[in-house]
Amino acid sequence: MVSRGALRAHLLDARLAGVVATSREVSLRSYRLFAARDPRVVIGLDPAGSWRQRDLIALMADRCGVSADPACVSGLDVIDPERTLTALDAFADRIAAAAQRSAPVLLGTGHPHRLLGFYAALADALSAAGCAVLTPAHGRCVDITTRFGLRTYNLAYVRGVALVREPDLSRPGCEPGAHTHSPLPVRTVLAAAAEAGGPLPELVIGDHGWVCGAGQLGFEAIGLADTDDPALFVGEAEGAVSVVVPLDDAVRSDYYRPLTRYVLNRACLSQ
């Protein structure tokens, strides 16, 4: 069991919150690209509002705790740990609600090297609570545009968590998966589930395009996001995404274990 105070200290010590590794320059670039509706940053969301860069700075200051000053253009971003903890509570409450009604769930990540263990523990706990952890479209190919051009990936599931892999690295025992922001994997998965006659997820848990892509299609979606991922927070502000937890999404994988214990304890799913 991890207390709120202990978790707050861990967030700061591990730099999951407080001063994080994401630079202000990188975040501002993401805000500019989002304002221009660049698909690499919008990641499946179709914003209803007109979001200018200054609007995004204000939103991210409110949701994450980054500087609200547009004149602040360098240095490292800051995430308010209290905002992270409050969002984690809401995140856990959504998981608890899904568990209580034995809802079918889908988990997916674009950060398998860092976050696979976090999501896999949630998948294990939800499965033990009677939720169907869905795995549609396993092995299906997905073409994703990257900075290196169009690349073909394979959809795979590791411990109930969806991710994409390069085709020549899909054998057991290889690296966990590829980093991606694309919404195409979740669209492919949801389409496959619908084509098969269901079930469809009542809750989607993940990050990047997994959350925005599902939320845009009307599925309840919750997830984690860094300060350079404005799309998830815009989705939350507009009601397409239910909960977004602000934190650094690229620290060591074992640093997320206390968050796992905290979420499962609050959701009454501790094993």
Image (tube, rainbow, N blue to C red):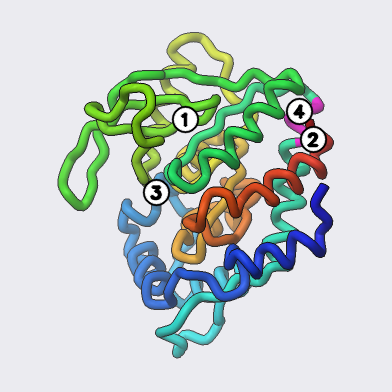
The local crowd at label 2, few if under 14, some if 14 to 19, many if 20 or more residues have their Cα within 10 Å, is some
Q: CA distance from mark 3 to mark 1?
A: 17 Å
Q: CA distance from mark 2 to mark 3?
A: 33 Å
Q: CA distance from mark 3 to mark 4?
A: 28 Å
Q: Residue at x 57, y 46 (%)?
A: 240
Q: Nearer the viewer, mark 2 or mark 3?
A: 2
Q: Nearer the viewer, mark 3 or mark 4?
A: 4
**Dots 3, 4 in contact, CB < 8 A:** no
User: Tag 1: residue type?
Assistant: Ala
Q: Which residue is mark 3?
A: 43
Q: Which residue is mark 4?
A: 99
In the image, which residues are magenta?
96-100
Residue 164 horizontal/vertical position (percent): 36, 33
Q: CA distance from mark 4 to mark 1?
A: 19 Å
Q: Residue at x 82, y 47 (%)?
A: 1
The local crowd at label 4, few if under 14, some if 14 to 19, many if 20 or more residues have their Cα within 10 Å, is many
